[in-house]
Amino acid sequence: MQEVVARVHKRLREPRKLYIGGRFVDARSGRLFDVINPATGERLAQVHEAGPEDVDAAVAAARGAFRDTAWRRMHPSARERLLLQVADGLDEWRKEIGAVECLNNGKTLREGVGDVQPAADIFRYYAGWARHVQGETIPVDGDDFVYTLREPVGVCGQIVPWNYPLLMAAWKIAPAIACGNTVVLKPSEWTPLTALMLAEVCKQAGVPDGVVNVVPGFGEVAGAALAAHMDVDKVAFTGSVETARKLVHASADSNLKKLSLELGGKSPLVVLPDADIEDTVRAAFWGIFGNKGEVCSASSRLLAHREVRPRLVEALADMANDMKVGDPLDPDSRMGAIVSQAQFDKVLRYIEAGKREGARVAAGGERITDGDLARGFFVRPTVFDDVTPDMSIAREEIFGPVLSVLEFEDDEGAVRLANDTTYGLVAGVFTRDIQRAHRLARDLEAGVVWINRWNGFDSAAPFGGYKHSGWGREMGQHALEHYTQTKCVWVAL
Ligand code: NAD
């Protein structure tokens, strides 16, 4: 892998460009921005910064491609092949993309490389759908033949965050192009590099010019320009509730573009007294400390029955204390660096708030300042016990490696506690009692419920949230709802 990392560094010496209309181009303003390696705090690369005029050009390219019959009328089997070729391209470049993700996001190399397979899989999954986006025939009163067509929505603006930069881009682009739309994707300003690599893969795979465009830039500038654009038909967004509110306003104030929103979570993992403790601890641990806790579906609230809480906390604290946090490139590291200075400061602020509000630090609770790690944004995996529902660490999304443990006495109390949040992304139940598990699954207010497991993901299974966690579902057949619109055709017979 060392060779791959060296190769990647060499590539990144050249400023990365925007991808518009099938070409890698400079930003019209000539402005560049720095992308930081969070493990060292040093500059990793420079990237051309898209401004509103670049967004205009990308939208124009996407509109042109959308109107072009080469794309509109492309045979479904050809579109299927195209998506399969993108998936193959991702596989071929797995190590390079994984290394860039690791250097840019701070996740471990294992995690970075591990993100590429599901990204390729989602292109394979929607390749299958390219031949199945179909309408229906409808019996009506009278002498008419009535049928529906499922047509693409048009130009889709797609705005993604920094925690899974490649995977989030793939979740968005694959269903959009499978249905015949065109795309302008804006990656996070902190992690724009792998979305640009995905653009290269699309180009090599033969995706027609203008069908996929990538405009790295800042949220308030490039993101806002995309959200307010009069010629963007839809925006698909993954990110914070705060930004989502701005997108809703931008849509209302522009062309009422359609919106799908994948937002945050403060997800409860409920442990009943009869749960298999070993399995539960493993799932809860990786649910909050995998990818540094920078996961929308992190198991950030562990709701433990009174009888099992002490055992769970002890086991989780032991694992946290043993976890190797370190250089993301080191194959022995199990947790890397927090993505940015701003996110690092936010995580540390919440840790201080937890201490101030009276929670007990069972593990971690500080930044790491040992040796070289002092240069980067490293935090010890932190377990807070004795957390009460009013504390900020029980209510607000931290998006970092901080676990809050709360206690309940009976199933009713567990459900009340679990649903006592504005979010509703995912939830989990650990128990051997199948009846109780299903009852809780019914009562939990969340878009996904996991029973005796955490973080189950599959390209075919819908994902998304209740309440403030979003609008709509990604993945599976459900995502086709976002990327098609229904036309009803009446024929008098
Ligand atoms: P964010 O909302 O700050 O940024 C997300 C994206 O929006 C970035 O590309 C950013 O540049 C852009 N943006 C920011 N301001 C904008 C504006 N005014 N107009 C248009 N675009 C703008 O979120 P983040 O900090 O990057 O990501 C973390 C959040 O994402 C967390 O809340 C997390 O839970 C959520 N998330 C959700 C899922 C999911 O599938 N539900 C997945 C990953 C992350």
Image (spheres, grey):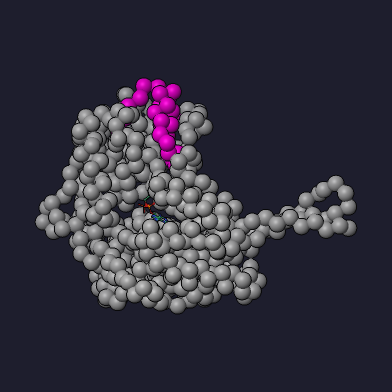
Q: Quadrant of the N terminus?
A: bottom left
Q: Residue shown at 39%/28% (left/top)?
A: 417
User: Can I make out residue 347 in this image?
Assistant: yes
The foreground one among 170 and 189 is 189
Farthest front residue in view: 253
The foreground one among 481 and 68 is 68
The foreground one among 362 and 208 is 208
Q: Is residue 12 shown left or right of residue 78?
A: left
Q: Which residues are magenta?
A: 405-433
Q: Quadrant of residue 197?
A: bottom left
User: Can I make out residue 476 in this image?
Assistant: no
In the rendered image, the vertical position of residue 486 relative to residue 436, given as above or below: below
Q: Quadrant of the C terminus?
A: bottom right
Q: Residue shown at 35%/57% (left/top)?
A: 162
Count numbered badges in the picture: 0
Q: Residue shown at 20%/39% (left/top)?
A: 352
**Looking at the picture, how far across and down is residue 83, in whole percent?**
53, 67
The foreground one among 218 and 40 is 218
**Looking at the picture, how far across and down is residue 435, in whole percent?**
50, 28
In the rendered image, the vertical position of residue 199 relative to residue 261, given as above or below: below
Farthest left residue in view: 371
Q: Is residue 334 shown left or right of residue 48?
A: left
**Residue 295 is a magenta residue:** no
Q: Residue shown at 88%/49% (left/top)?
A: 142
**Residue 417 is a magenta residue:** yes
Q: Quadrant of residue 221?
A: bottom left
Q: Is residue 249 shown left or right of residue 336?
A: right
**Looking at the picture, how far across and down is residue 331, in whole percent?**
24, 60
**Looking at the picture, how far across and down is residue 205, in whole percent?**
49, 74
Q: Is residue 15 shown left or right of residue 417?
A: left
